[in-house]
Amino acid sequence: MRHAVVMAGGSGTRLWPLSRSGRPKQLLDILSGGVGGVVASGDGPPHSLLAEAFARLETVLPADRIWVCTAARYGAQVQAALPRLRPDRLVLEPVARDTANAVGLTAALVADVDPDAELAVVSADHVIRPVERFAAALTTAYDALAARPRSLVTLGIRPTAPATGFGYVQRGAPTGVPGVAEAASFREKPDRATAEAYLASGEYLWNSGMFVWRAATVLEALAEHLPASAEGLARVVAVPAGPQRDAVLAEVFPTLPRISVDYAVLEPAATEPGRVLVADLDVDWLDVGSWPALAQTLERAGEDAVSGLAVTVDSAGNIVFSDDPDHLVALVGVRGSVVVHTADVTMVCPVSDAERVKQLLAAVEERHGSRFS
């Protein structure tokens, strides 16, 4: 049967001080009914990226075949945010050991209840519109497994600009499944000139970090290329679900080698011709990984992106965020700045330095410990 997992264990440090270690970005109610700037905004109560990712998968699968993998410390918050998530579909990592082990753990647990499971792996920090196109592309990716059961299918986003912050995947030979091609090559984040060439060629897609494969295939790949992880995960599922399995997981998981699923599974598989496929995903896609990205989901106040109680005069190109309904943020003559106010932190930085927020948080932790993280 077809299953899917939402990977929701990230800490979202580049959205500090809004995103904190105790409540990261994927659990914050920062989205409304639509996405301003990417597509027309719409009505609807505020909701989290995680809730949207779960609801998006429900357009393809029943809730009882949707899993969520997150850090153990977020388990209660995830359950509260997703009332339709079955408790036994919540995968809790005792510690972070990178994506190969998170995906491997989920694949092992899914295969334990459904040995023939086809498993989609999606992220909790993407905004994707329209949902109907996502559903169609995901269904197509599942269909590709029927034709090539040992394949690893990645979802590639049709690029709309020569972005230098994303990896790219090059389409190769057709597979016979409409919208799915063999992956000819993977490219790391390019410089501007290379990205422009990729866009002009029409051969390259943004690598979304979303995949579809059989759970057994992932476990086989780990056994071949990352045997320590495969052996450890096999120990976990060898015992019955419940406290005994939880104890083995707590013992084994911290010892697994830290590595990403791209390096552990996809790169070795890509050396086999025709093993890795790419499904074309033609959507408005936003990876909410920074303040400029989040700004695309916010309401516009003149030339500024604003959330919360704020007034701007003779200002432009700013990102203003306040989560305190009784605190006014007021700007005059300010250009190109990020201004974020929370109950215990106020942060100001140029939009051009927004990628350095992670560096700023490290400096804060060095001086104040974990008090503000």
Image (tube, rainbow, N blue to C red):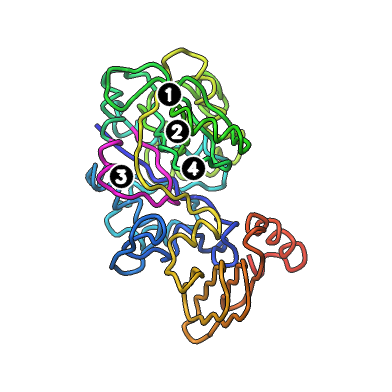
Q: Which of the two marks, 1 or 4, is nearer to us in this view?
A: 4
Q: Foreground: 24 or 225?
A: 24
Q: Foreground: 311 or 13?
A: 311
Q: Is residue 9 left or right of residue 333?
A: left
Q: Earlier in the sequence, mark 1 or mark 4?
A: 4
As measured in the structure, the alpha-carbon distance from the residue carrying label 3 to the one carrying label 4 is 32 Å
Q: Which of the two marks, 3 or 2, is nearer to us in this view?
A: 2
- Residue indicated by mark 1: 171
In this rendering, the answer to whether 310 lies above or below 149 is below
Q: Residue at x 54, y 30 (%)?
A: 197
Q: Foreground: 192 or 95?
A: 192
- Residue indicated by mark 2: 205
As measured in the structure, the alpha-carbon distance from the residue carrying label 3 to the one carrying label 2 is 26 Å
In this rendering, the answer to whether 95 lies above or below 291 is above
Kind of residue indicated by mark 2 = Leu
* Extreme-top residue of the structure: 273
- The circle drawn on residue 161 is 4
Kind of residue indicated by mark 4 = Ala
- Residue indicated by mark 3: 66
Give the magenta part as a residue range: 119-138
Q: Residue at x 35, y 37 (%)?
A: 281
Q: Earlier in the sequence, mark 3 or mark 2?
A: 3
Residue 252 in percent (x, y) is at 55, 37
How packed mark 1 is, by other alpha carbons closer than 10 Å (few <14, some 14-19, many 20 or more), is many
Is 130 covered by the magenta stretch?
yes
